[in-house]
Image (cartoon, rainbow, N blue to C red):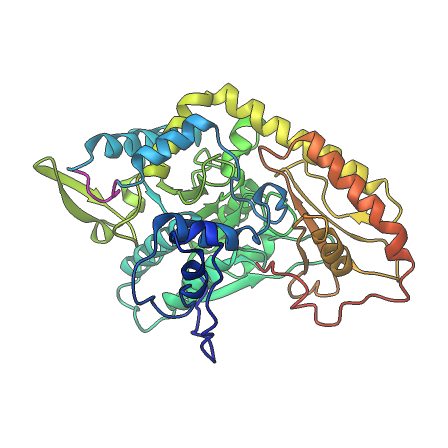
Amino acid sequence: MPLHKGPAKPDERPVTVNPFYGEANPIGGMTEAPPQHRLPDGPLAPSTAYQLVHDELMLDGNSRLNLATFVTTWMEPQADVLLGECRDKNMIDKDEYPRTAELERRCVAMLADLWNAPDPAAAVGCSTTGSSEACMLAGMALKRRWAKRNADRYPGARPNLVMGVNVQVCWDKFCNFWEVEPRLVAMEGDRFHLDPQAAAELCDENTIGVVGVLGSTFDGSYEPIAELCAALDALQGRTGLDIPVHVDGASGAMVAPFIDEDLEWDFRLPRVASINTSGHKYGLVYPGVGWALWRSAAELPEELVFRVNYLGGDMPTFALNFSRPGAQVVAQYYTFLRLGREGYRAVQQTTRDVARGLAERIGALDDFRLLTRGDELPVFAFTTAPDVTAYDVFDVSRRMRERGWLLPAYTFPANREDLSVLRVVCRNGFSSDLAQLFVEDLERLLPELRLQPNPTTRDKDAATGFHH
């Protein structure tokens, strides 16, 4: 979460209240409105407090029109009911809520089977608040395993983690928080993610693991996990170094098993030690729930596991957070039960079809050039054509926001900082009809943008609220 500071100068202006929501005396309701940056002296009527918060939130963007987020923005009414029924349940209280704990266990078992664990009964896993926590847990396991193998040199030797420069920011945080050196494979030309051979060349005796991303947030492309494992197999043959792979499948781990079944990226590859995903992305659940799984108990050091009393017995737990809601875990189980494999396949295929169709429409416009086409993750990136000089991607993002669309514009990292792009994330609930409206709004803007003398955005960092 972002860190916030208090206001430099407290705003003592009262929040205005519609007299209809105040007390019986409408004048009192207007003149005795609460302050914004300190606790009110007394309570408000619940209808007044609700209306104040409700009205302010009207200025937020419409989540269904947010093409930046990977997070689920629509669920069925039945899921909403279950979420409401379970919002007061604390996930850590296994003995108070044994059935919620059982649903979590079933979800882990289903994912172990979905991701082709050699022995699903031997795989271990847990729910998390999202992929960021899951990545932290996986990274901690990698580091602890490396430290045990190198007990004669650690803590003198500094561990490192190899990954593409395109990884999600949670991996930068992991390296910072747990004092691990990040070794980044740069982008090159039209390759916008990790190169397997380049990753292997960065490995040494202090490498705790290599992160492969199944679905890069920059452009929606899958990293070649099988080729990465093969490069590390060859490295072990030459040097004896046995480097495990963690697959960050925040998005793709809930897409590829259903519509890219022949793609080998999961526990079918012996070098893959652990996998994470976000249940609240293409797992089709509202935020926040994620999952972390290890091939077997051998990949998760026992000393990282804590024990909690569970129905008079002993239950192992592994998490950074303690108290957190159980509602999203229940919603994940509901969605698994509701859809099954064929249901997930239909949803993810439909979403990919929308992404590919929308990418084709945008690619047909002379003003833009596609980088990806939505044929891996249902996500694609595009930029302005070389001969477009009157405007840039930041102008497009700003003008589309005027029509309600939240379309992220951003610059790529090292080695491709010359490239600024727009990215569209298609999710369940973003229908072909909405995609048609999006294209129509985009086409409607182009004549105005072409009349600009030059791009209007000077501070590109401030041009968009989207950052990796």
Front-lying residue, 337 or 398: 398
Front-lying residue, 168 or 65: 65
In x, y percent, where is residue 137? Answer: 35, 52
Horizontal side of 150 relative to 385 (left or right) equals left
Horizontal side of 155 relative to 185 (left or right) equals left
Please determine whether, in this image, residue 341 is positioned above or below residue 397: above
Please determine whether, in this image, residue 273 is positioned above or below residue 343: below
Examine the rendering and report whether any part of residue 112 can be seen.
no
In x, y percent, where is residue 413? Answer: 64, 63
Front-lying residue, 315 or 89: 89
Horizontal side of 200 relative to 431 (left or right) equals left
Please determine whether, in this image, residue 104 is positioned above or below residue 195: above
Q: Residue 435 colored magenta? A: no
- Image quadrant of residue 262? top right
Residue at far top of view: 342
In x, y percent, where is residue 257? Answer: 51, 30
Residue at far left of view: 312
Q: Measuring 41% from the left and 70% from the top, which residue is drawn there?
A: 37
Q: Measuring 77% from the left and 60% from the top, which residue is drawn there?
A: 395
Callout count: 0
Q: What is the quadrant of the C terminus in the image? A: bottom right
Front-lying residue, 83 or 195: 83
The rendered magenta stretch, by its main secondary structure, is classed as loop
Q: Measuring 59% from the left and 60% from the top, which residue is drawn there?
A: 467
Examine the rendering and report whether any part of residue 406 can be seen.
yes
In x, y percent, where is residue 7? Answer: 46, 75
Q: Which residues are magenta?
A: 89-94
